[in-house]
């Protein structure tokens, strides 16, 4: 463990008199005028104020190797590490390693020793070794390994003993604590170790191809976890969302991801499935759910072209079911095939986050039955009575497996340690708690978990799993050996459920209900509902527990995205409309921002009975586009103001978006006036044409008559001339 002592008093450093500040000059003048004492005090105060800041304290840590277990014939190696965060070099100093001949008798004693905030005093101290730690450069680190003769512990009684390191540094005595274990011999009861195989915190329902490629590549988190448990006897608690994320990609899954999945399925380790996304079970119970949430299908994540037909299908890689893709045409893997984690030895098993399983949670989970088998809930010993508690037990008839909470927490801390000394210290603490459990009941089964952790390395997790698999000299086995025989009856302490996560889940489920109603506009509603359920389970995943601030932001972002989806379809608000005729179509647009076509019904409701509107109009809106819709309108009034309210609904009559009011100005009398004017104009033109024609005929008639008269006169003249 790492500890720190109170910082020493600040040293005053005289500053070189370069350009003296005006305030200092003024103080000197005051001193010369006879106020020397007061001036000197003020100068000292100024010097203290302007002095250098206090250097950050040196941190010291100490840890024994091999889980802190003392061997009779192998020297015990103890490592001391010091970190100098200051900007100055720290000189060499003596390091003393000590213990006590008085053992730490209880878990509370061990916890108090490891978490001490002041240099603790131990009864009957014994110095084990002394050495000099070399000087440490500014912002550097120093380490010292000391070997302790095993004969030192000859004749010591079995138990957990305190271990302390003291370092005489330039900043005073620094100190750190850890523990040693003198084992009485191997425990005779069964031992099981549970290691989680989970993904980082997610907001989407499944890992993407890019995320999978990164996590399953060499050095990736999932690759490291799998490599660390390979060859061990640990029981694997696997998030089925991980294997599903790989399988839904079919042939387009990254090569590293497919290799990782093959390696997982090839492991002989016993295993059980966590809830999808490792969703927080206590949060779901606190939200009032009678059963844990589950996804119903993952078909929207699949593409038929990624699943070519195979003449020789195999269960591990090729779909053999009659599942369908989002369009319902191509055979795709079923949900069971997608989430298959390999042979399961004990099922079903629920693992609530440590410290969250109270009687209500256990009762709710214990009531779940799968394939006529009652469920088993993993429960931390810290919430179970009496102490010590057996591993195989029942709470009011609900079956539980009780794991050692103290040892499991230390194993989880070790798994995510990045430095060797904190890693070794956490493993020693886990050994100490397991030793106390064995001392209390040597032949009782012992269950430990590598409590959920956020990050790891292959080295840290492998060392953790290896030590956990041999705690108290036992040999790890599967959960089946722990569930043999009749369970003991135990009680569970009452817990205060976290209100904020439960309230957030309730809100998310309300949003999901709204989205499910909205999704009825789609030919396949699961295109929206299935990813939504998967995303909710990921959002309440246990990976978010260490980062509540980021979780709040993720929930808010998800709700904003849901609101955007619910607003993706609607009537484009039209401008005011003027009807210049007694009947005309009302033309408007329906917006669809979804990537899929939707089926809608447009409901038009006038507020004036004299305005007749087609009440329902089917609308087939294409994907990501606006669709024009015409609604016939007939006015029974020559002139007036009215309004039509437009509302989109799904084929099942679910309201889609808000209703839109449209103001309609009816000017139907303009049509009659126009007809009269046109009739008058046409009639006038006809009359004018008739008059013109008559006049023309009359003129021709007059011209013809005048022509006859002239001809007759000419004939008379000719007759007279010929007579003469």
Image (cartoon, grey):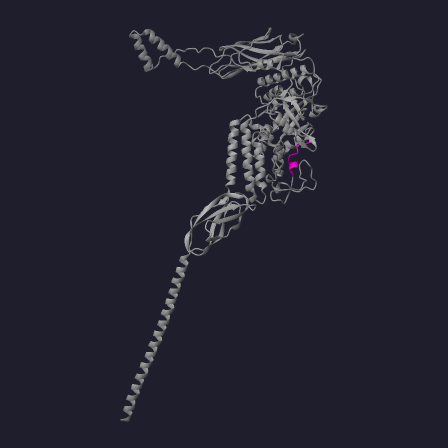
Residue 296 in the image: above or below residue 394: below
Q: Quadrant of the N terminus?
A: top right
For the residue pair 253 and 658, the one nearer the viewer reads as 658
Question: Which segment did they paint magenta?
Answer: 334-342
Residue 256, can we see it?
Answer: no
How far from the left and from the top, in percent, is residue 375? 67, 29
Q: Residue at x 37, y 69 (%)?
A: 687
For the residue pair 170 and 561, the one nearer the viewer reads as 561
Residue 385 in the image: above or below residue 335: above
How far from the left and from the top, in percent, is residue 293? 61, 33
Q: Quadrant of the rendered structure where residue 371 is?
A: top right
How far from the left and from the top, in percent, is residue 587? 47, 51
Q: Quadrant of the C terminus?
A: bottom left
Magenta-drawn stretch contains 341: yes
For the residue pair 57 and 348, the one nearer the viewer reads as 348
Q: Residue at x 31, y 12 (%)?
A: 26
Residue 555 in the image: above or below residue 628: above
Q: Residue at x 35, y 10 (%)?
A: 42
For the residue pair 193 and 283, the one nearer the viewer reads as 283
Q: Quadrant of the rendered structure where residue 25 is?
A: top left
How far from the left and from the top, in percent, is residue 636? 45, 55
Magenta-drawn stretch contains 701: no
């Amino acid at each position: 463990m790492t500890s720190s002592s109170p910082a020493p008093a600040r040293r005053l450093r005289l500053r070189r008199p370069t350009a003296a500040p005006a305030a200092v000059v003024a103080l000197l003048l005051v001193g010369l005028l006879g106020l020397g004492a007061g001036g000197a005090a003020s100068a000292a105060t100024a010097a203290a104020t302007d002095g250098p800041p206090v250097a950050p304290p040196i941190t010291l840590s100490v840890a024994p190797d091999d889980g802190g277990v003392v061997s009779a014939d192998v020297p015990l190696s103890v490592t001391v590490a010091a970190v100098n965060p200051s900007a100055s070099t720290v000189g060499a100093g003596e390091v003393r390693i000590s213990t006590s001949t008085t053992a730490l008798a209880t878990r509370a004693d061990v916890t108090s020793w490891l978490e001490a905030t002041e240099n603790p005093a131990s009864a009957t101290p014994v110095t084990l070794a002394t050495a000099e730690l070399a000087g440490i450069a500014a912002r550097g680190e120093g380490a010292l390994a000391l070997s302790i003769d095993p004969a030192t512990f000859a004749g010591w009684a079995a138990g957990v003993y305190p271990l302390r390191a003291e370092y005489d540094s330039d900043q005073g005595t620094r100190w750190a604590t850890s523990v040693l274990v003198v084992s009485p011999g191997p425990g005779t009861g069964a031992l099981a170790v549970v290691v989680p195989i989970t993904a980082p915190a997610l907001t989407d329902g499944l890992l993407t191809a890019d995320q999978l490629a990164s996590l399953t590549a060499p050095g990736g988190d999932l690759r490291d976890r799998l490599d660390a448990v390979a060859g061990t006897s640990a029981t694997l608690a696997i998030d089925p969302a991980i294997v599903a994320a790989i399988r839904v990609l079919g042939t387009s899954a990254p090569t590293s991801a497919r290799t990782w999945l093959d390696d997982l399925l090839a492991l002989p380790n016993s295993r059980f499935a966590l809830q999808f996304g490792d969703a927080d079970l206590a949060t779901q119970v606190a939200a009032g759910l009678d059963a844990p949430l589950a996804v119903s299908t993952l078909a929207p994540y699949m593409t038929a072209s990624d699943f070519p037909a195979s003449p020789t299908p195999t269960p591990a890689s090729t779909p053999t079911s009659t599942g369908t893709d989002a369009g319902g045409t191509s055979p795709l893997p079923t949900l069971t095939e997608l989430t298959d984690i390999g042979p399961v030895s004990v099922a079903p098993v629920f693992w609530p986050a440590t410290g969250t399983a109270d009687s209500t949670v256990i009762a709710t989970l214990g009531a779940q039955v799968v394939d006529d088998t009652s469920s088993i809930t993993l429960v931390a010993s810290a919430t179970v009575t009496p102490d010590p508690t057996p591993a195989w037990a029942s709470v009011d008839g609900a079956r539980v497996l009780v794991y050692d909470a103290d040892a499991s927490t230390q194993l989880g801390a070790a798994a995510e340690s990045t430095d060797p000394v904190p890693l070794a210290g956490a493993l020693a603490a886990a050994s100490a708690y397991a030793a106390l459990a064995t001392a209390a009941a040597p032949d009782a089964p012992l269950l430990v978990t590598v409590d959920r952790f956020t990050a790891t390395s292959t080295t840290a997790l492998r060392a953790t799993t290896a030590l956990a698999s041999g705690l108290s000299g036992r040999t790890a086995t599967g959960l089946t050996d722990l569930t043999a025989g009749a369970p003991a009856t135990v009680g569970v302490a009452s817990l205060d459920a976290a209100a904020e996560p439960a309230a957030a889940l309730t809100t998310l489920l309300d949003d999901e209900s709204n989205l499910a109603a909205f999704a009825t506009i789609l030919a396949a509603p699961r295109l929206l509902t299935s990813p939504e359920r998967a995303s909710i389970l990921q959002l309440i995943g246990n990976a978010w527990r260490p980062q509540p601030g980021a979780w709040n932001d993720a929930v808010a972002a998800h709700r904003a995205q849901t609101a955007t989806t619910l607003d993706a379809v609607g009537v484009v608000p039209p401008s005011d409309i003027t009807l210049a005729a007694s009947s005309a179509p009302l033309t408007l647009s329906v917006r669809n921002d979804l990537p899929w076509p939707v089926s809608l019904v447009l409901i038009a409701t006038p507020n004036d009975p004299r305005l007749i509107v087609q009440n329902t109009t089917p609308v087939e809106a294409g994907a990501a586009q606006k669709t024009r819709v015409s609604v016939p309108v007939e006015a029974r009034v020559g002139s007036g103001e009215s309004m039509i309210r437009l509302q989109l609904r799904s084929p099942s009559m679910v309201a889609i978006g808000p209703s839109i009011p449209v103001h309609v100005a009816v000017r139907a009398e303009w049509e009659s006036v126009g007809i009269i004017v046109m009739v008058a104009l046409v009639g006038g033109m006809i009359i004018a044409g008739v008059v013109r024609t008559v006049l023309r005929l009359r003129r021709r008639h007059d011209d013809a008559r005048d022509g006859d008269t002239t001809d007759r006169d000419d004939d008379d003249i000719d007759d007279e001339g010929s007579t003469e």
